[in-house]
Amino acid sequence: MFLVVVSLIFSGMCACAGEPIMFTSCNVPGTIASVDVYPCPSQPCIFRHGINGTVKVTFKTVFPALSLKTELYAILAGVSASLPLPNPDGCKDSGITCPIKAGSLVTYHTTVPVLKQYPSLRLVVKWVLRDENNNMQFCFQFPIEIK
Ligand SMILES: *[C@@H]1O[C@H](CO)[C@@H](O)[C@H](O)[C@H]1NC(C)=O
């Protein structure tokens, strides 16, 4: 009985932590093990104005690095524009402890507010984690809709 309760609690937690999504990698293929987004019960992920979106990426580090920086881009009709992030420091409050070694499996997470001034539209977002040597530790994109 105890085990059933514990596993129910844990499966409930997993549902809250995000949904694994389909994504397109834009750097070395195979470095990203999974991308979880919350809320995203089905794709394209729908983000309503005023909510916080959470993204969790489990990936294998490609290069050793001392510092990491997140970049977020909106791609619309082939044009890419940089979006502001509340916490662009990939080593701070991200689940990653810096410096990192090459070849470790780590999980990065961040939360991004869906600002009221964003227009309602469908677009592709590109997420990049870059190190101090300008290497991409991960790069992926997925379609979203802002409502
Ligand atoms: C989103 O996150 C910010 C900063 O942590 C917080 O102040 C705000 O209440 C959150 N909004 C929602 C809808 O959870």
Image: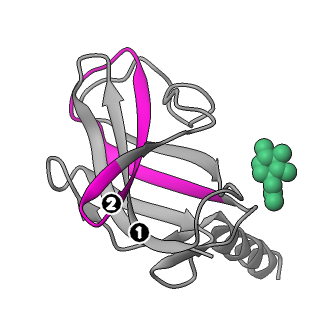
Q: Secondary structure at mark 1?
A: strand
Q: Residue 124, percent across and down?
A: 37, 65
Residue 140 seen in the current view: yes
Quick one: label 1, few (<14), some, or many (20+) residues within 10 Å? some
Residue carrying label 1: 123
Q: Nearer the viewer, residue 68 or 13?
A: 68
Residue carrying label 2: 141
Q: Main SS type for the magenta part?
A: strand
The residue segment tinted magenta is: 53-80
Please name the residue shown 67% across and 56% down the image. Answer: 117
Q: Quadrant of residue 4?
A: bottom right
Position above or below: 106 against 75: above
Position above or below: 35 against 57: below
Position above or below: 29 against 102: below
Q: Residue 75, percent across and down?
A: 34, 59
Q: Quadrant of the C terminus?
A: bottom right
Q: Quadrant of the N terminus?
A: bottom right
Q: Amino acid at mark 2?
A: Gln
Quick one: label 2, few (<14), some, or many (20+) residues within 10 Å? some
Is residue 59 inside the magenta stretch? yes
Q: Amino acid at mark 1?
A: Leu
